[in-house]
Image: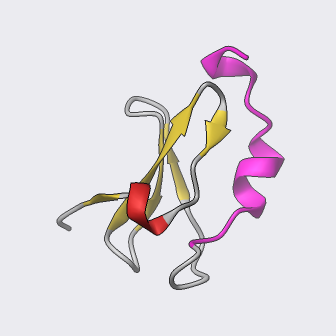
Amino acid sequence: MSEQSYDRKMLEALVCPQTQAPLHYDADRQELVSKAAHLAYPIRGGIPIMLIDEARKIDD
């Protein structure tokens, strides 16, 4: 699956597993960002990795 072929509706339906807040897709970094939890969940091989332990901590 190429980066451009993600189903935007599917990505918009995902929520942060920690806060249940909406996620924002960062196409440049291939991540789903939870501003509420200050976490960025990676997308690997076209699959969002929605594990808190796999998320990158971010500063806002």
Residue at x-position 73% and y-position 30%:
6
Residue at x-position 36% and y-position 65%:
39
Quadrant including the C terminus:
bottom left
Looking at the image, residue 15 sits to the left or right of residue 44; the answer is right
Viewer-proximal residue, 20 or 26? 20
Colour theme? secondary structure
**How many marks do you count on the picture?**
0
Looking at the image, residue 39 sits to the left or right of residue 34; the answer is left
Q: Residue 41, image x and y in percent? A: 46, 53
Quadrant including the N terminus:
top right
Residue at x-position 75% and y-position 21%:
5
Residue at x-position 57% and y-position 79%:
21
Please, is residue 18 above or below residue 35 in the view?
Answer: below
Please, is residue 42 above or below residue 40 in the view?
Answer: above
Please, is residue 33 above or below residue 44 in the view?
Answer: below
- Verify whether residue 14 appears in magenta: yes
Viewer-proximal residue, 17 or 14? 17
Viewer-proximal residue, 47 or 38? 47
- Verify whether residue 28 appears in magenta: no
Quadrant of residue 23 within the rendered picture: bottom right
Please, is residue 41 above or below residue 15 in the view?
Answer: above
Q: Residue 12, image x and y in percent? A: 72, 57
Q: Residue 16, image x and y in percent? A: 57, 72
Which residue is most to the top? 2
Which residue is most to the bottom? 19
Quadrant of residue 43 within the rendered picture: top right
Which residue is most to the front? 53
The residue segment tinted magenta is 1-16
